[in-house]
Image (tube, rainbow, N blue to C red):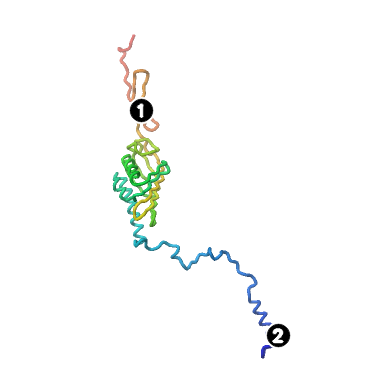
Amino acid sequence: MKFAGVPKGKARSTTQSKRLRQPSVRPVVLFPPGLRVNSSEPKSLTAPPNIGGVMRDDLIAVNLAAVEARFHTEAANQVEKALELCTDDVVWESPVRNLVFHGKAATGENYRRMFASFQVEEFRCLERFATEGRVVDDTIATLVLVGDMVENAPVPVGSKVQIRLLHIFDMRGGKISRELVFEDWKVIQPAVQELSFNVGKSVARSIKALGSGIILPQASYASPSSLRR
C-alpha cells in the first residue's frame, strides 16, 4: 500500500518507533482481583453509625454504665439489682474455678453466695473499654473472704486478698448476656484459724496460727505442794 507524499522509508521508521514504545514485559499482578482492598470505600471497614435506631456512641455509653452498675451491686451486696442488668439467658463463667452457670436463676444464686461471702474494701479499675456488643474490664478487688459459700475458693475463710479480675462482658440491648471472668487470687493477710489438739491425756491447749507463726497461751503450772512425793 502506498501513502501519498510519504516516502516508504519514513513510513517504516514510524511503524518501528511505535513498536519500541510498547512494554516488552507484562506487569506482575501481586494480588488477584478478589483479594484487593479498595481504599476508596473505607465505610465498609467501620461499624455503622447506628444500630436499631440507637447511635453507636450512645449504645457504648449504655454498656459502660451497665457494667459500672454491676460492680456497684457487688460491693453493696444488691443481688436483685445485679440481675436487672442481665438478660434472662445470661451465662456466668469462671474458668479458674471451673464454674459455669446458665440462666438468671443459677447466676443469681451464684451472686448471692459470692456477695454474702465478700467484704469488699475496694474496686480499683485499671482499664475499661467497650464496643457495641462487648465490655472489657481489668480491675483489682481488695476484699476479705468472710464466708464459706464461694464455690472452689482457692483461699481459706478469713483471708484478706487482692483479686486481679479480667471481665469480658457480652452485651445485648444494654444488658449483660455473658460474664466471663478470669481471676488471680493473691493473699495479702492470711486467715487467723483456731486449732486445738490434746497434749498427753488430760491437757488441752488452744493455739492460734497466724501465717507461719504459732502463738501459745501462757501455760499454768501445778504448785509444788500438789505434786506427789
Q: Position of residue 209 (x, y in %)?
A: 37, 30
Q: Position of residue 198 (x, y in %)?
A: 36, 22
Q: Residue at coordinates 40% horizontally, 50% vertically from top-left?
A: 168
Numbered disc 2: secondary structure: helix
Depicted 89 relative to depicted 195: above or below: below
**Which residue does the numbered mark 1 point to in the structure image?**
195
Q: Residue at coordinates 48% horizontally, 66% vertically from top-left?
A: 39
Residue situated in front as seen by the camera: 224 or 160: 160
Picture quarter with the C terminus? top left
**Crowd rating for badge 1 (residues with CA inside 10 Å; few <14, some 14–19, many 20+):** few
Q: Which mark sits nearer the N-terminus, 2 or 1?
A: 2
**Crowd rating for badge 2 (residues with CA inside 10 Å; few <14, some 14–19, many 20+):** few
> Tags 2 and 1 in contact by the CB under 8 Å rule?
no
**Which residue does the numbered mark 2 point to in the structure image?**
9
Q: Residue at coordinates 38% horizontally, 44% vertically from top-left?
A: 101
Viewer can see residue 93: yes
Query: Horizontal placement of 137 versus 79: left or right?
Result: right
Q: Amino acid at mark 2?
A: Gly
Viewer can see residue 126: no
- Distance between the Cα atoms at labels 2 and 1? 117 Å
Residue 4 in which image quadrant = bottom right
Picture quarter with the N terminus? bottom right
Q: Amino acid at mark 1?
A: Leu
Q: Residue at coordinates 67% horizontally, 88% vertically from top-left?
A: 3
The total of numbered circles placed on residues is 2
Q: Position of residue 121 (x, y in %)?
A: 32, 43
Residue situated in front as seen by the camera: 127 or 224: 127
Depicted 203 relative to depicted 12: above or below: above
Residue situated in front as seen by the camera: 55 or 17: 55
Query: Horizontal placement of 5 versus 72: left or right?
Result: right
Tag of residue 204: none
